[in-house]
Amino acid sequence: MIAPYICNIVAFNKLLLFFMRSFIIGLMLTISSLNSFLAQTSITISDADSNLPVPFALIYFTDLKVGYSADSNGIAQLPVLLRGSADISISCIGYATQLLSANLDTLRHVALIPTHNHMDEVVVSADMTRLGSENVANIDILKLHASTSAGYITLADALTQLPGVQQVSTGNGIGKPSIRGLSGSRVVVYAQNTRIENQQWGDEHGLGLDDTGIESVEVIKGPSSLLYGADAMGGVLFFVDEAFAKKDMLQGSVTSKYFTNSNGTRTSGSVKWSNGKWHINSSGAYNSHTDYTDGNGVEVRNSRFKTNVARVALGYQNNKWSTALRYTLLNESYGLTELDEREEVKTNAREPLEPYQNLRTQIISWENTLYLNKSKVKVNLGWVSNHRQEFESHHHEEDSLASEHEAEELAAIDLQLQTITYNARWQRQILAQKLSLIVGSQGMLQSNRNNGEEVLIPNADQIDAGLFSLLNFHYAKNSNLQFGLRIDTRKLNPIENESPEAEGYKAALNKTFQGLNGSLGAMHSVGTDVVLRLNTSTAFRAPNTFELLSNGEHHGTQRFEIGDPHLKSERGIQLDATFEVRQEHFEFWINPFYNRIQNFIYLSPTNEVIDELPVYNYLQRDASLAGTELGIHIHPHPWDWLHIDLNYAGVSGELTDGKNLPLIPANRIMSTVRGELTSNGFVQKWRFALQYSYTFRQTSPARFETSTNAYQLFNASVGADLKWFKQTISLDLGIRNATGENYFDHLSRYKYQGIFNQGRNFYLSLRVPFEFKMKEKSQ
């Protein structure tokens, strides 16, 4: 019935791209004339109980990523930036966050409700900007500035704090997020409001992002978001950029960290400025680590890595239009450890040995929001370039003195992936803001090219296009009903790059995959303390080029992998329920889920050996995953400075024949006790954290996996904010794996070589923020 509509999606998107190109050219031609006067309005922020002013509350424009502070009398002077209603959040420590869609011409007063619990976070990845507690979908939020001070080395490592999120790791530096047992191309990643594509098919390929310039990450678990891609069977990682500076302010920070285990250093800095209409953010970081040691003090040779990143963002807005142009350059170099590369004596070398990877990722994004009378249009364009090179010693053994330039020419694998993306949507609130509607289109054009000596996957072009619609009905206070539909098509066009007489030759094929997906969810509040959520959603994932056409040695995984050009699309359906109790000093939630996937694609070992490597074939079979996540948060009174958290996450997965799915993480319990005390004088704030995690034995490995024993980890940290004259200095000291536990994580690729995870690791972090008031121009 829908086939004629699906077949016309590509043609429709060509028309849409033409419209967007015309729209962008128009914006560029008129940008010089957009200099409208920004009227001022004042808002008073008060305490709802005492009616006293709330000083220094933060008023944040969620669309514009611009914030303004109230003064000591609770009065904020705001420009009328937008026509009609503007989405703003108002927050202050000790008060519940309020999210308003209000007309700044008439808004004069906001009363905040005191609370001893943590502030409710604003979610920007959902259908409409809303508080986390009001979302229909299950969305977890991680503030990255807090996690980086906790001693996590990489961004993927920091994400493992969240229940249900683990990482497929290759040593210290390479981590691929796994959500509820699904990873790789089943997890969609967004940064700079752009879909990030970086060869997700490889187990040893990392996230490809650095936390510099990123404020937080929002994790949408399961295929409950139709706005970001139908293939998000595991979920979506949505990274939120740092907000622009406050008006007429120059803000920034310098941070330095040191890690004892890998003799690692990280130096980062940021500077941002705003004059109310124009905004500039810039940031950068450099990381360098030597080989790490395990719990026995044994050095894991060639586990060293180094990265550097630079980011810049330019933003502008008036009362009709806001735009932001962003650029990121990330260079990464990772050593790959082999079985015999372990030594008792630490070398402290930082340059990787062969085999190693060099990666360069560039991201350019252009975000545009046009504010109409009662609706808004968002158009985001992106370009992602991922250049991956892998070097192996046997490719120039005969010339050990080869120059660096010659070594680059002998890269075993050299892949250049170029991706152009767009995401366009129209949003409208109707029926006194009880009904919100989103209609949009999303797609990408992708090109993969080989330049190395080995061809792991053939050259290929890919076109994705999709149409989606999401309807949200706010039928009662703090209660919502949501319904969505999405139609997708993917056209894959591999290009022949070898002779038909070549060994293992596979002819190029043209394939088109199509899918229809839907979601239905509800969030209902029972009184003021209890929230119920129920979601059901479907997903569609077309097989990628690697699964279809791989035919060669994959040295990163030590396997000879053979694809199947006859693979069908994966189709899944997930049921997800949440029961949540939120009181002033106590929270409890439990979230069971069930995920059924037809035509699940997986690797299966064979009895064959090619070039001394075991042969694995890509196969398909129906599969299911089921699990439960739960959490408890205690905020005891009168110790309002103390927080106690406990969470559990467990998942299991199997094929219809009873065989276990690969890369399913072991069940885990994590508990954290943290506190924060304020004082006067030289020490402005004290903080501490104690964390204990217990990971259960994984006794259900897949056919080519090994079981792993249970292990427990202890982490601790203490920190302070110091006031030196007028300058604030943040100092943190901590230890991870305090007992020096020698363990294998089930998702570690090194465990197959008998290589343990990292041992005891002390860390020290020093952060110096700065802020200057710029001279205001006279009107």
Image (cartoon, rainbow, N blue to C red):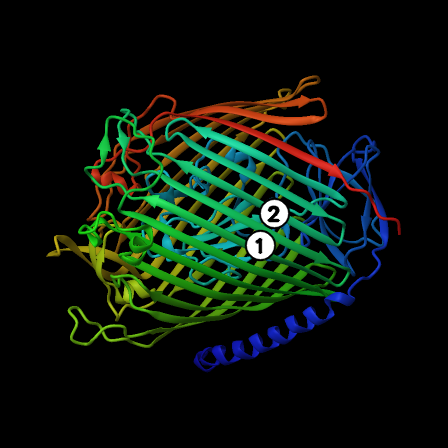
Residue at 30 percent of width and 49 percent of height: 653
Left or right relative to 327: residue 627 = left
Amino acid type of the residue that numbered disc 2 sits on in the rendered structure: Ser
Q: Which residue is mark 2?
A: 282
Residue at 53 percent of width and 61 percent of height: 227
Q: Position of residue 667 (x, y in %)?
A: 35, 37
Residue at the far top in the pictured view: 681
Left or right relative to 33: residue 778 = right
Q: Position of residue 482 (x, y in %)?
A: 57, 59
Q: Which residue is mark 1?
A: 126
Give the vertical position of 43 relative to 149 (above or below): below
Of mark 1 and mark 2, the one earlier in the sequence is 1
Q: Position of residue 367 (x, y in %)?
A: 61, 61
Label 1, label 2: how far apart the Cα atoms are: 27 Å
Q: Nearer the viewer, residue 775 or 49?
A: 775
Q: Nearer the viewer, residue 89 or 459?
A: 459
Residue at 34 percent of width and 40 percent of height: 351
